[in-house]
Amino acid sequence: MEEKIQELISEVEAFEASNKEQAEAFRLKYLSKKGIIAGLFAEMKNVQPDQRKEYGLIVNELKNKAENKFQVLSESLDASGGDASGPVKDLTLPAEPYETGARHPISIVRKQIVSIFSRIGYTVSEGPEIEDDWHNFTALNFPENHPARDMQDTFFIRQGATDKDAIALRTHTSSVQVRVMENSQPPIRTISPGRVYRNEAISARAHCFFHQVEGLYIDEGVSFADLKQTLLYFAKEMFGSDTKIRLRPSYFPFTEPSAEMDVTCSICKGKGCNVCKHTGWLEILGCGMVDPNVLDNCKIDSKKYSGFAFGMGIERIAMLRYDINDLRLFSENDIRFLKQFRGEIA
Ligand code: 2NL
């Protein structure tokens, strides 16, 4: 029996077809419901129990070889116009045009931001989207009763008996930077692009997920002047060399002091227009000096080291850059929207 199957295997291996009919005949002979291989499998019940395994293996080998042969034959016959002995496709015809795709606007802007910071020595760090309480909140100095920790603002999954060991979808990529600080020592210069989640009702201005780039710089003697100069460089690279910045005092649990940064409106050059609501300024990011508690939480000596951090929403920058007025456009995959970014390279 085994010899017979070996013979079939050799036969299959040697088989050639010069047209589709011959290939189909091969398929019917070996691979159809009433074909040789189905028959061999049906014989299984008559094989001695101690030989069934070996029998099964060799019939399977035959089946794989036959399937493979049929596929290779079909593909080569398709490519050659169906009949190797017949007329070949007219190779002088012009090639069929195929449409080129486009990068997603979020990818375009993310790549630009990453490229701007790469040029001044920042690495790119990534981390999990499903986070624990420590990396998303506690290490970052969020007080126990901070509103961001509420179920209303964050997607939690309760795993144990209490909320303490719940896991959550990260609300910012600072959690990635906590992991970087825990696993390395200064100097640290890194940016963390990624998707983040908030428990929000979906509208033109809010979504339950969006994309962020956060940045972190820690070393000896890093000051607020370093923060300002770094972010001025970023603003000029991103929005044009005549861009000016201004910082307004703000609050984040993980930085002290904290600020919001505005850039001069690139549309009206500061004169006032609809996009900047006639102020001449556009808010683009939040920033501040890393709170010493955060450094200590991540085993970095806050007496020796200091640093700054910042975070921006990629959607917000893309909306300003491309004059997009509805956040939902980014995730609806409407081809008429996506097509418009075809020419953009980044
Ligand atoms: C915003 C503001 C910010 C940070 C993010 C940060 C990270 C670490 C330590 C301290 Cl590990 N800070 N990140 C700092 C200030 C602002 O984001 O509006 N994001 C969309």
Image: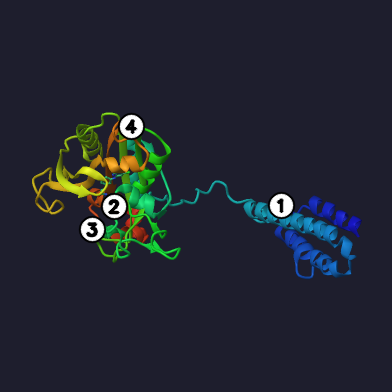
Q: What residue type is labelled 1?
A: Ser
Looking at the image, is mark 4 or mark 2 earlier in the sequence? Answer: 4
Secondary structure at badge 3 equals loop
Mark 4–mark 2 Cα distance, whole angstroms, equals 32 Å
Label 1 belongs to which residue? 85
Looking at the image, is mark 3 or mark 4 earlier in the sequence? Answer: 4
Looking at the rendered image, the disc whose residue lies closer to the viewer, 3 or 1, is 3
10 Å neighbourhood of mark 2: few (<14), some, or many (≥20)? some
Secondary structure at badge 1 equals loop
Looking at the image, is mark 1 or mark 4 earlier in the sequence? Answer: 1
Looking at the rendered image, the disc whose residue lies closer to the viewer, 2 or 1, is 2
87 sits to left or right of 266: right
* Residue 171 placement: quadrant: bottom left
The verdict on label 2 being within 8 Å of ligand 1 is no
Label 2 belongs to which residue? 142
Label 3 belongs to which residue? 325
Q: What residue type is labelled 3?
A: Asn
